[in-house]
Amino acid sequence: MKNSPFYSLLPKLFFCVFLLFLTIFKVQAQPIVNITVEPNVWGVANTVDIQKVLESAATELFSDVKAVSNISILVKPSKDGVPRTLFTKGPNGEFIVLLATKDRYWSQYSYQFSHELNHVLSMNKADSQTANQWFEEALGETASMFALRKMAISWKTNAPYPNWNSYSASLSQYVEDLIAKDERKLPPNQTLVQWFTENEKSMRIDPYQRQKDALVANQLLTYFEDYPAGWDAVTYINQTKPTDGQTFQEYLENWFNDAPEKHQDFIKKIANLFEIKVNCHSINLKKM
């Protein structure tokens, strides 16, 4: 019986059923991230080693991202010492990320690159800085802490190279030292809403106030660690083109309405941190 044609067809049959399952339920793995590192411009660091570190950061941050499939990134050194993601893409549609580090400071590569990966996810129709850019900078800081914490765990047993497993302690120390800084903590007897009321105006004018962005990020981190698919939700930021005069509530409402229903409770929780109520503009049946 086991030599019959029926049994020989079973593997193919199971494979076809599996493909059908993927099609019906739209199961999708995390995005394929193609990272190209400009060679021979990072001090004593080997280009391949840098790529391994950056790939590790992307793997941890994108583990629950389903809304995008393929991302190509060209990584180059920043000439002015400021890491950033350019609004203008490269000739082949790749994102261009500039990092301000060199040699073998793997924690610094991971920290900066994870921040910029948040911008890669959230850029969408944004093509210039707007008044709520500070929130995306805070998300970038959150992404850095999130990825470093996960890398510190995975590298204990699954570093890019076996002899790098011991570096997990350095990654952990780096991120925990950042989180513990006094400048990232709310002042005594002050809530986030009270602090935000005092600081929102200046942050809308200058979104690159790192201490303030980091303070907000410390408040956001727990929510993303509890719901890692929050990074999938981030891909829906700026689906509606942001405007400079937009209030933070309007910005969050656009995010809420552009995101699928599965992420809307998460976005509400983020809005609630600032005591902002987001309203549904209309029902989009495609997102049900």
Image (tube, rainbow, N blue to C red):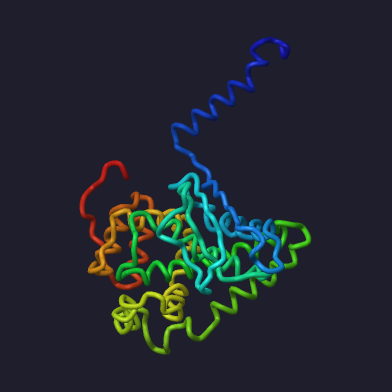
Which quadrant of the view contains residue 15?
A: top right
Can you give x and y, in whole percent of width and height, for residue 26 in the image? 45, 37
* Residue drawn at 60 percent across, 57 percent down: 37
Q: Is residue 275 above or below residue 68?
A: below
Let me know if residue 210 appears in the view. yes
3 displayed left or right of 277: right
Quadrant of the image containing the N terminus: top right
- Count of marks, rendered view: 0
Quadrant of the image containing the C terminus: top left
Which quadrant of the view contains residue 208?
A: bottom left
* Residue drawn at 35 percent across, 78 percent down: 206
Q: Is residue 14 above or below residue 245?
A: above
Q: Residue furthest bottom?
A: 188
Can you give x and y, in whole percent of width and height, for residue 185 in the image? 46, 83
* Residue drawn at 35 percent across, 71 percent down: 273
Q: Residue furthest right?
A: 163
Can you give x and y, in whole percent of width and height, for residue 155 in the image? 69, 61
